[in-house]
Image (spheres, helix red, strand yellow):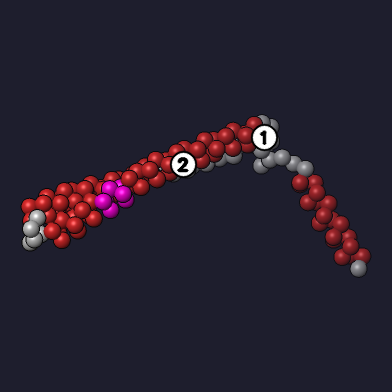
Amino acid sequence: MRILLLALILLTTSHVGLAQQTPYPIDSLSKELMRLDARVNQIDLKLDKTRRSFRRGIFMATLGYSVTIAGGLMLGRDNDNLGRAFLYTGGALGVGGTVLLVTSFNNLKAEPYVPKPPTLPEGKSP
C-alpha cells in the first residue's frame, strides 16, 4: 500500500512540474492564430464567390433546358419554326449554364496549408 501511495505521489508531482512550462512564446502563437484567421477569411470569401456563381449556373441551366423541352414539344405542330428557335436557344442557354456551373468550382482551388515549424525561445533546447 505504501509503494502504491509513493508511486501515485511521484507520478502526480512530475506532471505538475511539466504543466508549468510554456513551450512556445505567446507572440508566435498569436501570429499563428492571426495567420489562420486570415486563411479562414480567405476561404469564406472563395466559398461566397463559388456559391453565387453556382446558383447562377443552376438557374441558367434549368431555364435553358426547360426552354429546350418546350421547343421540342412544339416541333411538328403549327409553330414548327418557333419550336426550332426555342430548341436552339434553350440548348445554348443550357450549355452556357452548365459551363458556368462547372467553372464555379475553380474558385475553390486553394494552395495547400503548410504550417510553420514551431520555434523554441532563445536559449532553450528541446
Decide which of tag 2 and tag 1 comes sooner along the chain. 1
The residue stretch that appears in magenta: 57-63
Task: Verify whether residue 23 appears in magenta.
Answer: no
- The vertical placement of 25 against 74, above or below, is above
Task: Verify whether residue 59 appears in magenta.
Answer: yes
**Dots 2, 1 in contact, CB < 8 A:** no
Residue 84 visible in the shown view: no
Task: Report the amino acid beneath label 1.
Answer: Pro
Q: Residues within 10 Å of mark 2 (few under 14, many from 20)?
A: some
- The vertical placement of 79 against 29, above or below, is below
Q: Which residue is mark 2?
A: 43
Residue 124 visible in the shown view: yes
- The vertical placement of 43 against 87, above or below, is above
Label disc, if present, on residue 25 of the rendered structure: 1
Query: Mark 2 and mark 1: span between their CA atoms?
Result: 28 Å
x, y percent for residue 20 = 77, 43
